[in-house]
Amino acid sequence: MPRGQKSKLRAREKRRQARQARAKTQTQVLEGAEAIAAEEGELSSAHPVLEDSPQNELAAETPSTSTEPQETPSNTTGAASGTDSNAGASKQDEESSESAKALESFRRDPLNKKVVMLVQFLLKKYQSKEPITKADMLRLVIKKYKMHFSEILRRASEHMELAFGIDLKEVDPIRHSYALVSKLDLTLDGMANEENLPKTGLLMIVLGVIFMKGNCAPEEAIWEVMNMMGVYADKKHLIYGEPKKVITEDLVQLKYLEYRQVPDSDPPRYELLWGPRAHAETSKMKVLEFLAKIYDTVPSAFPVWYEEALRDEEERAQARAAARARIAMTAHSRAVTSSSSHIK
């Protein structure tokens, strides 16, 4: 193999390992936040942020482009499988030990407790549509950790984005006021309430899987990702309720998703596509930006999907320009007609 190709393969392997390390670290951090929230007796309000930690694995687990090496699952049997099983058990023990250490470290960091509290504070403000100011955050949440405000706010903002698909934006730099803006132009069905917030983040993940599967994803592919998040079709979830109903009924009725049977499939199989409201309220580029944020990279790091998202942006711009032209032409025609009638 040429030296240059070997270097590229090594670089790709390092990137893959780095992605897995980031996903593992984020999972440990969010598990630690869950432990803190439970100790505070506020698990119910904090838990939406904590359930979604495996979202970080989405981009790494979706099919890679032709430029990335694929891993082949092992199907060894007999003595070899026994050896693999022992090695796997040993590895799990090591990971459990590492996770326990990470949780303990997380609990000892007072900033992490403040991050959980700030996320809860932001959610309440978002649900009540009340203004968010730096002064309130410092007075009600941060308190004696004012010197660490920027770091606490940064971590809380990442949790809001990863769990709910919601950006925290500073709208007034002078008064230091902030706004929480959904990645969708509207929160589900226009309602910003506690029930729908987690579903918005869930929807962004499903839209991402559909996009990366060629704009039409078999239902099994959706559940592969959901299972990584600890969300199962046949098991009621603490936050999402009945996940299968949310994805295949609720979001379909709201026209964010389309759920249809695969033609000539026997037994019946189903697939999901973007619904008309998803096309209207978000875009492939926004979804790719969301996934890139989880991936700790930029949208252009996914060249195939990035090119498709760029084409989509261009087509949208052309459609908007054509619509404006039609409106202008209609207005001009009406003006001419009105002028002619007055002359008569």
Image: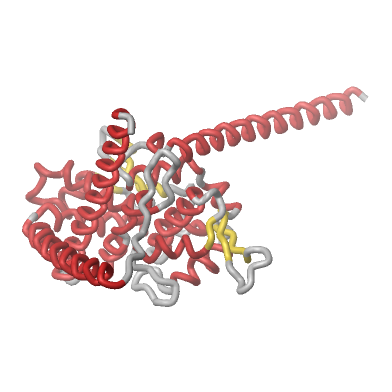
Residue occupying the point 42% across, 55% down? 205
Position of residue 334 in the picture relative to residue 299 (left or right):
right
Decide which of 230, 114 is in the foreground and name it: 230
Percent x, y of residue 77: 32, 70
Q: Position of residue 178 (x, y in %)?
A: 31, 43
Image height of 10 relative to 131, above or below: above
Image quadrant in which the N terminus is located = top left
Query: Residue drawn at (52%, 59%), measured in percent from left and top?
Result: 189
Relative depth, front residue between 144 and 59: 59
The answer to which of 336 and 251 lies nearer the viewer is 251
- Image height check: is 226 above or below 313? below
Q: Say whether residue 231 is left or right of residue 331.
A: left
Residue lying at 80% horizontally and 31% vertically, measured from the top left = 334
Q: Residue furthest right?
A: 344
Q: How is the image coloured?
A: secondary structure
- On the rendered image, what quadrant is the C terminus found in? top right
- To which quarter of the image does residue 154 belong? top left
Count of all numbered marks drawn on residues in the image: 0
> Camera-side residue: 101 or 85?
85
Q: Tell me where residue 110 sits by quadrant.
A: bottom left
Left or right: residue 133 compared with residue 197: left
In the rendering, at what x and y percent does residue 28 appear?
Answer: 19, 59
User: Residue 4, how many percent across, how many down?
Assistant: 31, 28
Q: On the image, which quarter does residue 121 sit in?
A: bottom left
Q: Residue furthest bottom?
A: 235
